Image (tube, grey):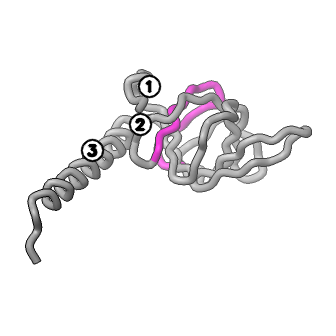
Amino acid sequence: MFWNRKDRVQKRLAKQKRKEQYDRVYKLHEEATFLCYIDDVYTETFEGKMCIKLIGSMAIGEGTVQDHYGLYSCEGRLKATIEIDEFYVGADSVNKLESSDKTVAIYPKQQDVKYMAGDMLCKPERSNYATNYE
């Protein structure tokens, strides 16, 4: 089978796009002082109102409830900068998550963001989140 020029160009562009996505995610891993993979997203009723609950797996570093975090897509694109209401490890409310924590629950203050499984919660070394929006 012969490939025409258009097919080769499209294949090369797709490969280049995958590499750019990989590079963004790799850079997040390299620069992160905190990184948590979001495994699942739930809505719960708490005190009569719906709230978002993120279930995640800790990967790198530590973070506190007072910190600001970048929510990144699985492609490494910044979706939002968020703050945290509460962290849970098991059934215990904690003020700080550490990389040694396995499965964690995170209750973000921002409820209007489109959270998805596969997202990453990250606190890069540099806190210049605005340059990564897309």
Q: Do the numbered discs 3 and 2 sit on residues whose CB atoms are within 8 Å?
A: no
Task: Tell which of 13 and 27 is nearer to you.
Answer: 13
The answer to whether marks 3 and 1 mark residues whose Cβ atoms lie closer than 8 Å is no
Residues shaded magenta: 58-73
Mark with earlier residue (2, 1)? 2
Please give left or right for residue 128 compared with residue 119 in the image: left
Residue 91: give x, y in percent of width and height: 78, 51
Q: How many marks?
A: 3
How many other residues sit within 10 Å of disc 3, few (<14), some (14-19) or many (≥20)?
some
Q: Which residue is mark 3?
A: 20
Q: Nearer the viewer, mark 2 or mark 1?
A: 1
Q: Position of residue 107 (x, y in %)?
A: 70, 39
Q: Which residue is mark 2?
A: 32
Nearer the observer, 50 or 93: 50
Image vertical order of residue 2 relative to residue 26, above or below: below
Q: Amino acid at mark 3?
A: Glu
Tell whether position 66 is magenta.
yes
**Residue at 58% over, 26% down:** 67
| Residue indicated by mark 1 | 129
Task: Assign the C terminus to one quadrant of the image.
Answer: top left
User: Marks 2 and 1: CB-CB under 8 Å?
Assistant: no
Label 3 or label 2, whichever lies nearer to me, is 3
Which of 75/32 is in front? 75
The picture places residue 70, in percent across and down from the top left corner, at 50, 32
Q: Is the residue 3 above or below the residue 42 in the image?
A: below
Residue 90 vertical position relative to residue 20 in the rendered view, above or below: below
Magenta: main secondary structure: strand
Q: Residue at x 31, y 49 (%)?
A: 22
Assign a secondary structure to mark 3. Answer: helix
